Image (cartoon, grey):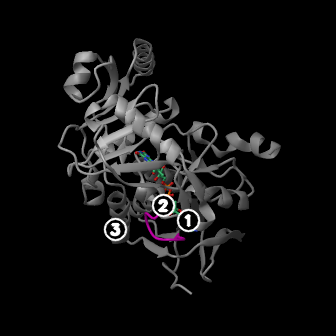
Amino acid sequence: MPEPATSQPDVIVIGGGLHGCSAALHLSLRGAKVLVVEKDYIGRHASGVNAGGVRQLGRHVAEVPLSVASMALWHRIAELVDDDCGFESHGQIKVAETEAELDQGRARVAQLNALGFTHEEVADRAELRRLVPAIADHCVGAVVSRRDGAAIPYRTTFAFKRKAESLGARFAEGAAVTRVARSGTRWRVETADGGRFEAPVLVNCAGAWAGRIAAQLGEPVPLEVIAPMLMITARMPPFLKPVVGATGRTLSFKQFPNGTVLIGGGLLGRAVPDENRTELDYAKMSVNARTVWDLFPNMRGATIVRAWAGIEGRMPDDIPVIGPSGTEAGVFHAFGFSAHGFQLGPIVGRILADLITDQTTDLPIDAFRIQRFRQTAVAA
Ligand SMILES: Cc1cc2nc3c(=O)[nH]c(=O)nc-3n(C[C@H](O)[C@H](O)[C@H](O)COP(=O)(O)OP(=O)(O)OC[C@H]3O[C@@H](n4cnc5c(N)ncnc54)[C@H](O)[C@@H]3O)c2cc1C
């Protein structure tokens, strides 16, 4: 049986991905005693194996205020976690291959401007070529978010863990939560290896498995377990600084400083969450490769050296659940980041700390209420 990680934690966080570690950090900064319970090891799942894209570009409108606030934290990330997390800001770009796609981009930028957001802008053909000299001739322009960038996922998650730990947070790894139950005014958490922990506040950051915790709390959600895939090439001569996506096709494309090129964008393999396993779909990966072939002629001789997938939770409306439980006092959720939660990690931990310590937050989180699924879950 593991040693109780803190004798009397104020908060138990289930899940040691970026969101759980960020919650632990922000709560520790406010003096709360936090215990994170992780079934495998910190950063084992989506937070450690993702593409590292730090993107405001193309966000669901409900996510934009959170994404903008998170980006401010990313640009000072070393002040928060004593590590730059490998964060580099060379912008993110969504390429338009046709005039119709560029018109979509113009409409999107106008929509954001009307809401008071100016981080996305339209780039014409010449500006696109200045930013991405290797782009194929047929591309007509792009939407650009210049302060966006990318970071190293596992290093980031671990930096949040390490900083939280230095402030007193404790981490129980290899401890799968099997049961959560109310015990008077406290929450009792039981783990598969015989651990028993109690605290007045419980936070559900269990990623693709978070629906199981929510169901135990009487609020089932239609969380789909997905397996986004990535592949990486052998080293290429340097040709690209920003992260590049496409308007009409699935793509996330970036070159690391060591020359390797990461190709992804959300095409899915198959997840086997009970076995911590994924299966790749090679036919879909060839679609991804074809997109790269079309948009970057210099990649036609590239060699793919490795491919993998991570396990992630997706909600039907593609935006996460963030906020208090709809059924139980003292419970908070942050899960279902639908394959774009890495960039939001720094701010979501702060929001959870706001909600837990101040009972409110200055960021708009109504759209992320778990109660929005009540009807669907009842019907299901
Ligand atoms: C291949 C891939 C590429 C991606 N690319 C990007 C990107 O470029 N940009 C971006 O913003 N986002 C990206 N994402 C999404 C991003 O990685 C996730 O949204 C984010 O990491 C989710 O973090 P999390 O902490 O909620 O979940 P996770 O990192 O999955 O952490 C949840 C943790 O909870 C633990 N857990 C679950 N159940 C229990 C239990 N019962 N007891 C104890 N522990 C439990 C799990 O073991 C896990 O470690 C990508 C995802 C994938 C898979």
Which x, y percent locates residue 298? 25, 34
Q: Is residue 114 above or below residue 210?
A: above
Residue labelled 2 has its Cβ within 8 Å of some atom of ligand 1: yes
- Residue indicated by mark 2: 45
- Residue indicated by mark 3: 162
x 76%, y 46%: residue? 377
Which x, y percent locates residue 348? 46, 49
Marker disc for residue 276: 1
**Which one is in front in this view, the residue at disc 2 or the one at disc 1?**
1
Q: Is residue 105 above or below residue 81?
A: above
- The residues colored magenta run 38-45
Depth check: give the residue in front, 58 or 281: 281
Residue labelled 3 has its Cβ within 8 Å of some atom of ligand 1: no
If you read the primary sequence from the N terminus, does the residue marked by circle 1 or circle 3 appear first?
A: 3
| Residue 182: quarter of image | bottom right
Q: Is residue 222 left or right of residue 199?
A: right
Which x, y percent locates residue 347? 42, 47
- Gap in angstroms between the C-alphas marked 2 and 1: 8 Å
x 51%, y 85%: residue? 3
- Gap in angstroms between the C-alphas marked 3 and 2: 17 Å
- Amino acid found under the numbered disc labelled 1: Asn
Q: Can I make out residue 83 in this image?
A: yes
Label 3: few (<14), some or many (≥20) within 10 Å? many
Residue labelled 1 has its Cβ within 8 Å of some atom of ligand 1: yes
- Gap in angstroms between the C-alphas marked 1 and 3: 24 Å
- Amino acid found under the numbered disc labelled 3: Arg
**Which one is in front in this view, the residue at disc 3 or the one at disc 2?**
2
- Check residue 365 for magenta coloring: no
